[in-house]
Image (spheres, grey):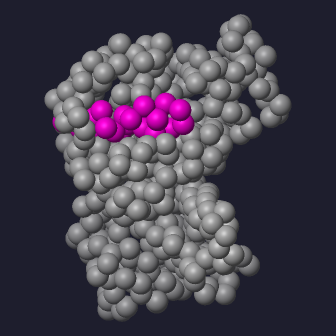
Amino acid sequence: MSERLLIKAGTVLSMDAGLGVLSPGEVLIEDGLIAAVGADLGVTDAEVIDAPDSIVMPGFVDTHRHTWQAPLRLIASDWTLGHYLAGIHSGFSKHFRPEDTYAGNLLGTLEALDSGITTMLDWSHNLATPAHADAAIEGLKDSGARAIFAHGSGAQQWSNLPSTVPHSDDVKRLREQYFSSEDQLVTLAMALRGPQFATKETTLLDYRLAREVGTRITVHVGDGEWGKSRPIEWLRDNDLLGDDVTYVHCNTLGDDELAMIADSGGTASVAADVELQMGHGWPATGRLLDAGVRPSLSIDVCSSNGGDMFGAMRSTIASQRGRDNGQAEEEGISLVEELRLSCRDVVEFATVEGARACGIGDKAGSLTPGKQGDVILIDTDTLSLTPMNNPWGAIVYAAHPGNVDTVVVAGKVVKRDGKLVGVDVDRVKRLAVETRDYLLEQAASDEGIADAALGGDWMPGQVRA
Ligand SMILES: [Zn+2]
């Protein structure tokens, strides 16, 4: 007998162009897949979640997160990019043992899942040894989320930039050992340094390796000063652009470079919180749209900012609106005619576009029948979301992880009544604290970060970007 789950909701945001919004509406999940979406499906033989005061929508997709940093949560919230490079990259990263990578990935992915992010791309670039990669993958798998493990090598490849050390070919072993199928919850991608952080020769080798292994590519470009070196132009001249690549940040790329991304069918990831804090430049949301690229959104580093999509959506819309209105003011326009970026656009970035950027647009991102049953339910029966007058505004400007009542991944209920199901949360928190304590202990005898301290006042020595 098939497993059937019927969700009855006040509002269904299908994020499917043909199905639109149903208010009220129903979503039927059968054998892990979306089977039907409609106003009244007349189903009588399914398990039912009856939630008239709720918004039901596809789970969010985070397209770029250095998940390993979760145990260093918010230690860097007042840091510049220079502090961050000194404190985390030259500092704490080398002290991670495989069990710390595991603790970080488990904590970070469960945090995401709990907040309604059903798919997360783990941009894993602190893999000192194959055992670290194994641990990172284990953390993702143990979480129960849909995840993309983006293999990004480690300190050996991320020191002395631009690096001449090729991407670790351990990724070939991982492909064979864990990722022989695309038909599983955790799949493989490659997180490359690209032309900003590796030499041109090394970049050619890295891209060749990715295409040999047969994975999608994710690469940082256009962040701050580094991004002004015309990386996209160089990639185009070397025939390395493609629809299998996601470009993270894009802030300081030229308009013509954004157009090159659009022409190649590439996707983009905006991480507004970090970009605004670390001086990467204005989030490129509006410029990407002008060039014909609808971006996805990402969290980036939980050492600086929160790990949920609500915060990322708010920073994205606030920064673009601030920029547009600021520009209008400079041009002497006292009142703009209309806001060009809508809340609905931003919800699309966080769902449909996220799935597309992860190469799983056929599996996730909308409640289209045939796609995976990755669904979240936002409880609107709260003082901050009642009366429910505008679901798009509610999601972008008012909702928070505490409103995420239910999370379903591939038809399996992983959060219900506001609590993760079958997760030993105390164990996860204990592992994270143990890792944090271990890292601080190691810092004490590490010259570069010997003064590391909790509480928010510690500023690591600056490293020049
Ligand atoms: Zn990043």
Residue 301 seen in this snapshot:
yes
Residue 129: % across, % down: 41, 16
Looking at the picture, how far across and down is residue 409, in whole percent?
39, 59
Q: Is residue 394 above or below residue 165?
A: below
Q: Is residue 395 left or right of residue 249?
A: right
Note whether 311 is above or below 368 in the view shown: above
Q: Quadrant of residue 216?
A: top left
Is residue 218 within the magenta segment? yes
Residue 324 x/y as whole percent: 59, 65
Q: Nearer the viewer, residue 388 or 393?
A: 393
Q: Residue furthest left?
A: 212
* Frontmost residue, 317 versus 397: 317
Which residue is located at x 43 percent, y 67 percent? 348
Q: Quadrant of the C terminus?
A: top right
Q: Which residues are magenta?
A: 213-235
Using the image, determine if residue 95 lies above or below residue 150. Answer: above
User: Can residue 127 be seen by looking at this rendering?
Assistant: no
Question: x%, y% of residue 235?
Answer: 28, 35
Among the 4 quarters of the image, the one containing residue 417: bottom right
Q: Is residue 194 magenta?
A: no
Residue 31 lies, with reference to residue 179, above or below; the image says: below
Q: Residue at x 46, y 39 (%)?
A: 222
Residue drawn 32% across and 78% down?
17
